Amino acid sequence: MITEFRCQISQPAIDDLKFRIRQTRWTDEIKGSGWQFGADLSYMKELADYWVDKFDWRKVEDTINEYPNYIAEIDGIKIHFLHVKGKGKISVPLIITHGWPGSFMEMHKLIAPLTTGPEFSFDLIIPSIPGFGFSQKIDTPGCNLWFIGDLWNKLIKELGYQKVMAQGGDFGAGISTALALKHPEIMLGLHLNYIPGSYFPFLSPGEKLTEEEIQSLKKTEDWYTNEGAYAHQHRTKPLTLGYALNDSPVGLCAWIVEKFYGWSDCNGNIENVFTKDELLSNVSLYWFTETIHSSIRLYNENSRAPLRFSKTDFIKIPVGIARFHKEDPFPTRKFIERGYNIQHWTEIPIGGHFAAMEQPQLLANDIIQFAKKIERYN
């Protein structure tokens, strides 16, 4: 069953958020340390002041409600999604999945360039992962990328599509990969701007990785040593973290905004890439829906069911990769080709982890180029 959805947060909830921000008990910091030890204190204070005095959630709601929003009930689970039909003579169904700490709103800047082409466009399906945004929280074990891939398969069929393309970064890359592995019969192609962190291809007995691949894995290990404390906490004790982040809006904001700073191609100034309104729209969505714990719980679930390819696991459908400059860690092409049928690869010299927000036109152009390579649409 699919019903229309309209975003409307109550005024008391908005007032409560502002009250809590005003009551923040601020920490200290090492003078002049900036972002070295986490979210910069002076910037967080600046952002908090803006949140209370200038940020307008009602404008965010208007942007959300500008597009057709729906709730689909699939196997008793309510999934929120946007469904925006393309205007082109040819319009290819495309399901785009977000990651953490993003949301479906990450994809708003992609909608116009992907749906308005007069000759070639896409019918966009942009769902919220369970436990994110307006999708239902699942409080029983097993909601991992494989489970979500199965939900997407049913959502696609519920919408009447026989075949689709899939695109994703972060968790969206893992879910789209799971969809391609388990349901290749509905897939036209797979486009990724990230490779799932748990991905490891099947190696035949005696087969060894190249020196380049080994060095790439070492680089990934070093990245997690220096930057991955958040992920280890998410994988192991997400509930403990959830108490604090669900109760303190500034704490929640710092946890999320630090990643937008660290993972984007912002060159040391987060507002080179994101406006305060963009950052706070995303954080406010997590706050109002109380989904920080349910979202980070996905790390724990995925750790129990990683993307370790077996002998028979190989994505045979065409795969396109957009490698954005600041996206790190990122495996070598050889390592990815052991499990994915790469037919398209683009090195993009700018942009980072949040490609749909940072460089939407470049990402959209690459998706379009890849889609046009798929034979049936030539």
Image (tube, grey):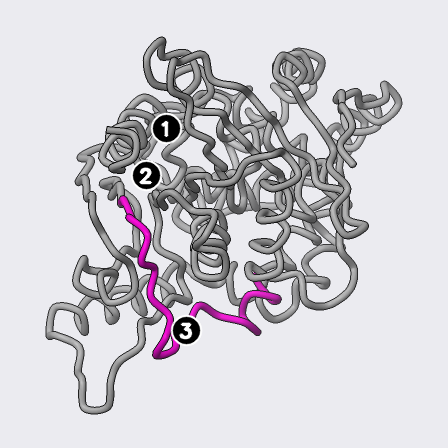
Residue 228: say if magenta. no
Q: Earlier in the sequence, mark 2 or mark 1?
A: 2
Asked if residue 252 is positioned above or below residue 19 in the image, the reply reads below
Quadrant position of the C terminus in the picture: top left
Which corner quadrant holds the N terminus? top right
Which residue lies most toward the right here? Answer: 12
**Given contact means CB atoms under 8 Å apart, are the residues at marks 2 and 1 in contact?**
yes
User: Quick one: which residue is furthest to the left in this view?
Assistant: 211
**In the figure, residue 252 lies in which quadrant?**
top right
**Which residue type carries mark 3?**
Arg
Q: Position of residue 114 (x, y in %)?
A: 40, 21
Where is residue 93 shown, x and y percent of the image?
Answer: 47, 31
Task: Write down the region rendered in magenta.
Answer: 299-320
In the image, residue 204 above or below residue 143:
below
The reply to whether dot 3 and dot 1 touch (C-beta < 8 Å) is no
Residue 365 falls in image quadrant: top left
Residue displayed at 83% across by 22% down: 15
The kind of residue tagged 1 is: Glu
Q: What amino acid type should be assigned to the residue bearing mark 2?
A: Gly
Q: Which residue is mark 1?
A: 358
Residue at figure coordinates x 55%, y 65% from the top left: 302
Where residue 326 sits: x, y (%)?
27, 42
In the image, 370 versus 145, the foreground residue is: 370
Element assignment for label 2: loop
Q: Which mark is residue 59?
A: none
Q: Please determine whether, in this image, residue 345 is positioned above or below residue 197.
A: above
The residue wearing badge 2 is 352
Q: Which callout, 3 or 1, points to the residue nearer the camera?
A: 3
Residue carrying label 3: 308
Marks 3/1: CA–CA distance: 30 Å
* 17 with respect to 211 (left or right): right
Q: Residues within 10 Å of mark 2 (few under 14, many from 20)?
A: many
